[in-house]
Each structure stands twice: as structure tokens, then as C-alpha cells.
Amino acid sequence: MAKLQAIRGMNDILPEQSLSWQYLERIFQGVVRRFGYQEIRFPVLEQTELFKRSIGEVTDIVEKEMYSFDDRNGDNLSLRPEGTAGCVRAADQHGLLYNQQQRLWYAGPMFRHERPQQGRYRQFHQFGVEAFGMAGPDIDAEILQLAASLWQDLGLTDYLSLEINNIGSAEDRQRYAAELTVFLQSKVEQLDDDARKRMHSNPLRVLDSKNPAVQEALQGCPQLGDFVSSESVAHYQQLQAMLEAAEIAFTENPRLVRGLDYYNYCVYEWTTESLGAQGAVCGGGRYDGLVEMLGGKTTLAAGFAIGIERLVLMLESLHKIPDSALHPVDVYLLVVGDKLAAQGLQLAQQIRSHYPQLGVVAHCGGGKYKRQLKRAFSGGARLAVVLERDEEGSEPLQSLKIRRLDDSGESETVPIDEIIPKLGEFL
Ligand code: AMP
């Protein structure tokens, strides 16, 4: 019978790769803890309406990319394409947003039916942070500082750059969109099908078209910056001053509008050149209107999402994952010969209880010394402890051997009751 395969664009993360993921997760969790953010978990499946209302009906995500279906009760549900909508729904439903300030984070899988390629998948994972109840721009600066701290801890600061833009309020954008549509109509001959369609439904999305012909047609178009309110400008200027004070480098990109409708005031994106086409690693901004759009009270809000796969790709290709994070096993215990299995398990347990930070594997299933040693090497262990019956065959064993599994091959035979301090010397 033919074997079944994973769905296109949905990856299995195998044990070796999981080590990189776990490393990244540890560092991320350390950073959010240091900033006082708390974890929130919410379902991967929500009512489709939640995403339609929050992300916007005329967006790539809602128009073409959601995994939506009717369940057995006939309710229309979707796998979450991003985290903010579900986070807001959950926080509001449980009263976390009522006259309160919250600093939250989440992590987990998201689903978008995009064309898969390196760095772009149909199931991918995000870390996100969301802050509620704070007017900013200090909280916006704090969130960017949090991202910058993450890059710092991962050794990626030099490979990421921050672009920011002021996109004003929803009303500002409506006035601007009307003007932009008039402009685009005058250039309709130079636009591609996508831009022509968007020109009426969501003209701002034409601005970040990747088609050079469309970009050419946009020369001289009205600028969003001329339409934004003075409050929005003040917020943006203060944010810039705070970023400068925090020594976070940024550039302004007036074309940055982002793919989701719910943002207002400042939006931003961290990108890298080390990933090829899929260079966006982290995107976010303010979204003060979203809670109300979802039926809650008006709530100040801001946050970002980071693509985990893209960060892992960066860390791996730039060799930024410390060696120690990539070794699941520190000590491999070879158990050579019959009747030593019980003693082997016991010894492994003794080592674990003295050195709880170590990964200790006791060989199971018997076999010759050479085969077991090969396992120790292939498992990536640093040290082998060899439990082998000596010539006289005395039992239980009185001594064993510790061997370094590096080029030195250094080894020493030690009395069994000295194994714990001796291991300490070898580590
Ligand atoms: P967005 O929610 O579109 O702003 O995306 C936030 C981040 O998630 C992006 O900067 C990417 O790093 C990541 N991301 C978005 N879509 C995908 C995808 N299809 N595959 C992998 N990562 C993605």
C-alpha cells in the first residue's frame, strides 16, 4: 500500500531540528520573562467570522489563504492564520481587557494556504507579543526593544533591520485611499491584474506590489504621510525619539502598509537579507480599533509576530546556535556483556541524580562494544562510560572506563565508587 505523506507546505520537525527550535524557544521565553510578559494559549480553530472581521475581508489572507470549513454542526470555522485575533478574542472573553493593562505572549502554529517555498509554508509557527491598555508610544518602543533584545541574545542584531511607518488612523487611510484610487485610475494601463482588482477594493495594498511595472506606475502617487492626523504624527515622532534613545536603528519606509487591516498609527517590520525572497522576520504595530471591531470596548493595543521557521533558518545558516544546544546527549553508558544491564541502569540513574543538567543515555538491547561505541558517537555524546566485565568476570563490576569522544580519545579506568567525582573532572 502506498505510504501517506505530510500535506504540502506542512513540515515535520525532526529530533535534530527540534534542538534548534528548543534553543530558540528558551531564549524567547527568557526575553519575555525579563520584560514581564505572560503567556496566553488559545485554540488553533476559531469561527471564520473572527478573522474576517479582524484581518479584513479584502486581504490576501481572508480572500485566498484561510483553511475554512463547515464542521458537523454547520458552523463555519477556520484554522488561525495569525495570532492577534484569537489572542484578543480570548483576552476579551475572559475579562482581561476590562480597565486593565496586559502584557501577553503566545507561540504556536498558524495556517495559510500560500505557495510553499523556502521560508514560506502552509503551517508555520509564530511567537507573538500583545500589550493592551497603554496609549503609547512608550509601549510601542518597549515592544521594539523586546524584539531588539531577542536579536541581541540570538546574535542576530547585525543581520536584521527595522523599517517603520506611520499609517494614521482608519479614517485617515480612508481619505487617502480615495485619492490613491483616483491616481491609480489614471495609471490603469500600467497596472497588472492584481493591482487593478485592488485599486478599488483595497488600494493601499497596491503600494507594496512586488511588480516593478506597478512600482514604476506608483511614481508620484499621493503620499499617506500627507493624510495622517497630527496626533498620529506626534505619536510617530515620539516613537522615533524613544528608539533613538534606546539605540535601536531604524529607517522610515513610507510604502510599508502591512497585509492586515487592523493596524493604526505606527507599523513596523524587521527584515533580513540572509534569507533570500522571504526576508520578513517580524511584523507588527498598533491596533487600537481591533477589540471594538470584535465586539469589545475600545482598547488600546499593540504587538508583533515573529516567524519562527525564518528565525531558525537564519540561526542555522549563520551558525548562531551554540554547540552545547545541539547535543541532546552528554554521557553515553556502554553496557557490554550479559547480566550488567541492571547495574548499567542503576549507574545511569546515579549519574542523572548527581548531574541533573546532563543528558545521560544507558545503552539498551546489548551488542558488542564497537557497535555500542558507534551509537555513542552518532548520538553526539561527549563522554562514554564503559561498563564491561573484566577478565576475571567479577560481579558486580568494581571498575569502569571513562572515555572522551573527541579527537583526544583520552580515557581513564576508575573504581566504580569514584565515578561521580571523576565524571566531574571530565566534564
Ligand atoms: P504576518 O502575520 O503576515 O505579519 O507575519 C508575521 C511573520 O510571520 C512574518 O514576518 C514571517 O516571519 C512569518 N510568516 C508569515 N507568513 C508565513 C509563512 N507562510 N511561512 C512562514 N513564515 C511566515
Image (cartoon, rainbow, N blue to C red):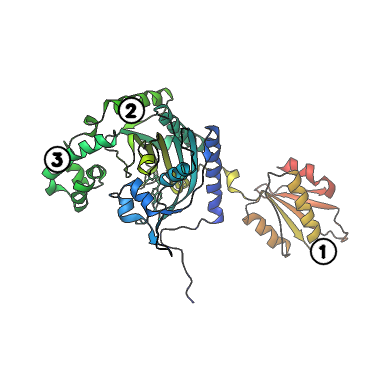
Q: Residue 273 placed where, x, y %?
A: 37, 41
Disc 1 marks which amino acid?
Lys
Q: Residue at x 40, y 26 (%)?
A: 243
**Element type at mark 1:** loop
Q: Residue at x 86, y 57 (%)?
A: 396
Residues 99 and 384: in front is: 99
**Mark 3 — residue?**
183
Tell me how far mark 2 sits from mark 3, CA to CA: 26 Å
Disc 3 marks which amino acid?
Phe
Residue 207, picture quadrant: top left
**Mark 2 — residue?**
236
Between disc 2 and disc 1, the foreground one is 2
Q: Residue at x 30, y 26 (%)?
A: 231
Residue 122, picture quadrant: bottom left
Disc 2 marks which amino acid?
Tyr
Label 3: how many residues lie within 10 Å, few (<14), some (14-19) or many (20+)?
Answer: some
Between disc 1 and disc 3, the foreground one is 3
Q: Residue 116 placed where, x, y %?
A: 37, 56
Quadrant of the frame with the C terminus: top right
